[in-house]
C-alpha cells in the first residue's frame, strides 16, 4: 500500500520566512531499504510500442532505480565513481564567479525550501522514492511530477517549435522529436531558479543556473521496465561549455504506486490569494 507522510517545515522568519510543505511519499521508508543493491531479478518483457506510430511507449509510473521496492532496484544506474567524475567535470565547467556562489550556498538556500520544484535533470536524481508519471499521446507526451509540488510538463511531438514568447518557469518550455527509438526533448525558457544535480565539494547547497539555461534530454526505453534518461546542459551565463549528465535509470513502479498530490505554500502567497479572492467578492 502507498502511505502518506505529511511534513511540516517551519524555519525562523529571520532566515527566509515560514514554509509549509505537505507531501505524499510514494512508498514506506521500510520499502526504500528493502533489496538495496540488488539488480532486477524478474526478466522484463519486450519494449511496448504505440499503436499510432510504432514508437516506444513511455507511458507509465517511474521511480529512481536505486530506491523503492527491492525487485525494481537496478545497480546499473550511475555508480559513485561515475557520479564523482560527472561532478568534477561540472565543477571544471563552472565560471569562477558561479562556482564561488554555488560553494557559498547552504541547504537553507535549496529552492525546494522556498516552494520551488527541483526541475530537470535534478528531479531524475532525487535521493528518495518520489515518482513521476508519463502519458504518451499521438501529438504530445505529458510528464507529471509529485515533488516538491504536483507539477507537469507538456512535450509536443508533432513538429511544433518553441513559442516566440516564453514565460520563464522552473520546468521550462519543452518540444520533442523522435530519433529512431529515443525521444529527444529541447528545453528552454527557464527562470534561473533551479539547481543542477549534485553540489560543489564541501557545500551543502547546489549548482546554480541562470535564465540562459538550455537542455537537451534523451529518454530511451532499455526494456519494458527500464527507462534511461540523459541530459546535456548548457548555460553561457554560468558555464564555459556544455555538460552531459550520467545516464540515469528509472524503473517502472509497481501497479499500486501512483503520484500523489503535493502542496507547498508560503504564508505570504496564501495571504495574497486570500486578498485577491476577497476583492473579487466585493
Image: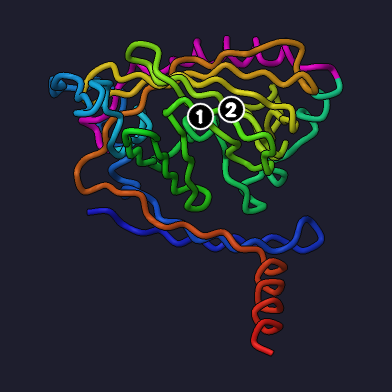
Query: In this orientation, which residue lies closer to the viewer: 64 or 46?
Result: 46
**Residue 93 sits above or below residue 217 on the image:** above
Identity of the residue drawn at 67% across and 82% down? 280
Q: Mark on residue 197? A: 2
Residue 211 in the image: state x and y as whole percent: 74, 33
Q: Quadrant of the C terminus?
A: bottom right
Q: Quadrant of residue 188?
A: top right
First in residue order: circle 1 vs circle 2: 1
Left or right: 129 with respect to 10? Answer: left
* Position of 175 relative to 151 (above/below): above
Q: Which segment is the magenta one?
A: 69-96
In the image, is residue 270 above or below residue 216? below
The crowding category of the residue bearing disc 2, from other C-alpha atoms within 10 Å (few below 14, some 14 to 19, many at least 20), is many
Q: Principal SS element in the magenta part?
A: helix
Residue 40: give x, y in percent of width and height. 21, 22
| Residue 127 pos. (x, y %) | 47, 35
Residue contact between numbered discs 1 and 2, judged by CB atoms under 8 Å: no
**Residue mark closest to the camera, 1 vs 2:** 1
Q: Which residue is under mark 1?
A: 160
Q: Is 272 situated left or right of 224 in this image? A: right
In whole angstroms, how far apart are the C-alphas of marks 1 and 2?
29 Å
- Please tell me how crowded label 1 is: few (under 14), some (14-19), or many (20+) other residues with Cα within 10 Å: some
Which type of secondary structure does the marked residue at label 2 adopt? loop
Residue located 37% across and 16% down the image: 182
Q: Position of residue 261 (x, y in %)?
A: 42, 58
Outermost residue toward the bottom in this view? 282
Residue 137 left/right relative to 19: left
Question: What's the colour scheme?
Answer: rainbow
Q: Quadrant of residue 144?
A: top left
**Residue in the picture at 37% in, 54% down:** 260
Amino acid at each position: 500500500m502507498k502511505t502518506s507522510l505529511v511534513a511540516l517545515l517551519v524555519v525562523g522568519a529571520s532566515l527566509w520566512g515560514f514554509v509549509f510543505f505537505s507531501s505524499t511519499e510514494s512508498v514506506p521508508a521500510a520499502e526504500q531499504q528493502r533489496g538495496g543493491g540488488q539488480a532486477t531479478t524478474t526478466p522484463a518483457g519486450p519494449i511496448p510500442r504505440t499503436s499510432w506510430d510504432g514508437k516506444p511507449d513511455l507511458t507509465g509510473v517511474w521511480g529512481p532505480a536505486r530506491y523503492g521496492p527491492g525487485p525494481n532496484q537496478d545497480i546499473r544506474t550511475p555508480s559513485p565513481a561515475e557520479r564523482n567524475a560527472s561532478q568534477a567535470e561540472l565543477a571544471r565547467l563552472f565560471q569562477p564567479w558561479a562556482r564561488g556562489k554555488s560553494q557559498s550556498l547552504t541547504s537553507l538556500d535549496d529552492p525546494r525550501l522556498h516552494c520551488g520544484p527541483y526541475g530537470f535533470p535534478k528531479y531524475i536524481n532525487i535521493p528518495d522514492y518520489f515518482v513521476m508519471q508519463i502519458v504518451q499521446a499521438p501529438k504530445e507526451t505529458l510528464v507529471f511530477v509529485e515533488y516538491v509540488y504536483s507539477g507537469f510538463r507538456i512535450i509536443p511531438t508533432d513538429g511544433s517549435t518553441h513559442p516566440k514568447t516564453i514565460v520563464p518557469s522552473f520546468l521550462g518550455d519543452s518540444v520533442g522529436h523522435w530519433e529512431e527509438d529515443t525521444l529527444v526533448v529541447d528545453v528552454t525558457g527557464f527562470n534561473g531558479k533551479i539547481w543542477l544535480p549534485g553540489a560543489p565539494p564541501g557545500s551543502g547547497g547546489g549548482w546554480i543556473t541562470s535564465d540562459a539555461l538550455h537542455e537537451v534530454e534523451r529518454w530511451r526505453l532499455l526494456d519494458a521496465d527500464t527507462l534511461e534518461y540523459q541530459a546535456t546542459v548548457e548555460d553561457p551565463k554560468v558555464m564555459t561549455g556544455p555538460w552531459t549528465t550520467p545516464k540515469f535509470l528509472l524503473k517502472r513502479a509497481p501497479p499500486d504506486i501512483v503520484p500523489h498530490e503535493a502542496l507547498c505554500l508560503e504564508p505570504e502567497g496564501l495571504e495574497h490569494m486570500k486578498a485577491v479572492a476577497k476583492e473579487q467578492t466585493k
